[in-house]
Image (cartoon, rainbow, N blue to C red):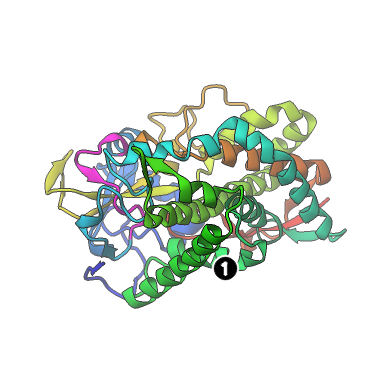
Amino acid sequence: MTAVERSDAHPPVLDWATDFDHTDEAYAADPFPIWDEVRASGCPVAHTERYGGAWLPTSHELVSEIAYDTERFTSRSVVASPFRPPREIAPVGIAPPISSDPPFHKPARRLLLPVFSPQAIDKIEPATRDYCEELIAQMGDRDVVDAAEEYAQHIPVRVISKMLGFPEADADRFRGFVNHVLEGVALPLEQRAEGMMHLFEYLREQLEDHIANPRDDLTTYLINAEMDGQQIQLDHAAGTIALLLLAGIDTTWSAIGASIYHLAATPADRERVVADPELLPVAMEELLRAYAPVTMARLVKEDMDFHGCPMQADDWVLLPFPAANRDPEFFDRADEVIIDREVNRHSAFGLGIHRCAGSHLARMELRVALEVWLEHFPVFHLADPDAVRWSGGQVRGPRELPIRIG
């Protein structure tokens, strides 16, 4: 990977339209007024020289346009940092299919569709519900619990590790990989490289174990998978597993935590959902819209003018799907959480060819997690709003969420 000039100091942002930083603490804590500020600045696309040059569209129209444009924007890296992977890794990328460009992307994505189909996900719902019950039981009868640390973060780790056939005892390692890859984007190249080396060394050990001891799990499935009649390379399998391990954990962890946060902070919405459980699926979609956790990234392929923005080759372009979901030009009352919103074409799971292949799994985990939580805790509030801490970077969700029960 090649380093790009940057300041190690990461000074606070003074002008979000011309010097944004998606890892800034203010952005993590409350990005909504920042997006409003950028939209009101006269240009809905913010720019920064940080991370070697990056752009941040804040309108649904522009986020959608870029997400669908695979001719001018490459997905060879979807996590913005001061470093760019070499162009030679396209069209496969380091973590296919999310990092793949056409024509490689389509068959690589097709490999995952059977294992993430609604029918396949239905089979793992009972075990997911049982585990949520276990987590609730472990909380005992305390008045204050941390819904992020004691509940939300554990559910996707258990689900993904069982699907992959990885040791559940490695849960802390998985969360460490997530924190390093997705939140540690400002670390020096040496530290980033070392962390990635540890991740792929771990995956190599797991692949070798599965080759020697095949079993009925997703890892063995990927080892034996074929594209165009040829068995896929182990590097391809490792990259896809890395994607599932990282994205499959952090995104759902964040969505569960953000949903509990909203219901704790908004008693009227909590009371409605508790009184009418059939409202939960609709409310869930609105919570996904309003608190969409994921921002993806693209790299500009060649120098160009994009709606007046002089984008240069290898500039980052962030795709803040949460900002698109809060665009008042696209959604009525976009800044309000309307838990019975009927028309809800949100983009929490992305747009274009990279729309999340695991959306059925994420929805099942979120629904089950909320059903179990609300059944046991019909009344709860934020124990200390100032103690809530949100993750920075491209996946936003509560990492500390003290909840008072009753």
Which region is colored magenta?
67-80
Q: Position of residue 88 (x, y in %)?
A: 20, 56
* Image location (x, y in percent) of residue 57: 30, 44
* Residue shown at the point (53%, 63%) measured from the top left: 206
Q: Quadrant of residue 182?
A: bottom left
Is 254 inside the magenta-drawn segment? no
Q: Quadrant of the N terminus?
A: bottom left
State which quadrant residue 398 falls in.
bottom right
The reply to whether residue 376 is visible in this rendering is yes
Q: Residues within 10 Å of mark 1 (few under 14, many from 20)?
A: few
Outermost right residue: 141
Task: Give coordinates of residue 271: x percent, y percent.
Answer: 76, 36
In the rendered image, is residue 251 in sight?
no
Instruction: Between residue 347 and residue 360, name the one nearer to us.
Output: 360
Q: Residue at x 35, y 52 (%)?
A: 78
Point 29% across, 36% down: residue: 62
Q: How many marks?
A: 1
Secondary structure of residue under mark 1 = helix
Side of 406 where 334 appears, left or right: left
Where residue 49 appears, as percent x and y from the top left, is: 23, 62
Amino acid type indicated by mark 1: Arg
- In this figure, which residue is indicated by the disc labeled 1? 173
Magenta span: predominant SS is loop
- In the orientation shown, which residue stands out farthest toward the top? 342
Residue at 43% from the left image edge and 53% from the top image edge: 237
Identify the residue at the far front of this view: 212
Q: Nearer the viewer, residue 349 or 238?
A: 238
On the picture, is 30 further left or further right than 14? Answer: right
- Is residue 70 magenta-colored? yes
